[in-house]
């Protein structure tokens, strides 16, 4: 009889220790999750600040000071080198179709352009305006909020495309050119 009590007591102690270890592991996992969530939130806020700073810096720059990377696109099928005007002429001007057409082989493909070492999806004029209107309709703005700056932070590709299509030479800043083209 004494033997069973001892073994039962040992089993109970082992079970209690195992249960404590399990609870400690759960607490550790919870604290790790909480810490990683806080770290992610912190990193996201730093990225947001950095993004906003880059956006504001771009918007405040003079169009003459912006050195655009040579924007040409090669057709993936025939390797034809398309310039900017050929890319924009190749768009179907359809909101649902963001592909351009190669003037050499009629192949349709998506284009990407680069400015200040940043890559953006190249959209047609109609898509740029429609995406801006959709973006604007989904948000509420404070009375004196800078819509273009917020747009540049949230959807830089819209700002990039609006800048590409604007009459850049008649404005002091990129922001002015974008505001004028988007009619803000």
Image: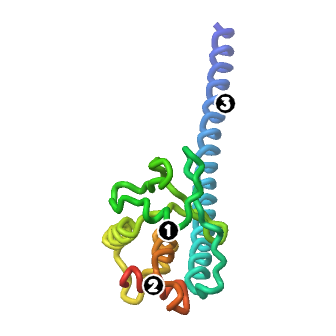
How far across and down, in percent of the image, does residue 149 sit?
49, 80
Q: Secondary structure at mark 1?
A: helix
Q: Nearer the viewer, residue 180 or 59?
A: 180
Apparent side of residue 64 relative to residue 107 in the rendered image (left or right): right
Q: Quadrant of residue 27?
A: top right
Q: Which circle, 3 or 2, is nearer the viewer?
A: 2
Q: Name the residue rendered at 63%, 55% in the picture.
A: 35
Q: Quarter of the image for the N terminus: give it.
A: top right
| Category of crowding for the residue at label 2, using alpha-carbon neighbours closer than 10 angstroms: few (below 14), some (14–19), many (at least 20) | few
How far across and down, in percent of the image, does residue 156 sit?
51, 69
Label of residue 17 in the image: 3
| Residue projecting furthest to the front | 104
| Disc 3 from disc 1: Cα separation | 74 Å
| Disc 3 from disc 2: Cα separation | 60 Å
Label of residue 85 in the image: 1
State whether residue 89 is above or below residue 152.
Answer: above
| Category of crowding for the residue at label 1, using alpha-carbon neighbours closer than 10 angstroms: few (below 14), some (14–19), many (at least 20) | few
| Category of crowding for the residue at label 3, using alpha-carbon neighbours closer than 10 angstroms: few (below 14), some (14–19), many (at least 20) | few
Q: Secondary structure at mark 2?
A: loop
Q: Nearer the viewer, residue 89 or 47?
A: 89
């Amino acid at each position: 009889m004494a033997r069973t009590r001892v073994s039962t007591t040992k089993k109970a102690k082992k079970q209690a220790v195992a249960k404590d270890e399990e609870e400690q592991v759960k607490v550790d996992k919870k604290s790790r999750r909480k810490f990683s969530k806080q770290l992610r939130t912190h990193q996201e806020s730093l990225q947001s600040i950095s993004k906003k700073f880059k956006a504001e810096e771009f918007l405040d720059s003079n169009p003459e000071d912006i050195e655009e990377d040579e924007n040409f696109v090669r057709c993936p099928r025939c390797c034809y080198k398309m310039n900017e005007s050929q890319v924009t002429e190749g768009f179907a001007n359809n909101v649902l179709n963001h592909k351009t057409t190669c003037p050499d082989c009629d192949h349709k493909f998506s284009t990407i352009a680069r400015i200040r070492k940043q890559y953006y999806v190249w959209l047609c004029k109609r898509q740029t305006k429609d995406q801006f209107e959709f973006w604007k309709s989904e948000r509420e703005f404070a009375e004196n909020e800078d819509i273009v700056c917020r747009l540049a932070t949230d959807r830089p590709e819209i700002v990039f495309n609006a800048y590409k299509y604007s009459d850049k030479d008649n404005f002091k800043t990129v922001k002015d050119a974008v505001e004028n083209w988007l009619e803000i």
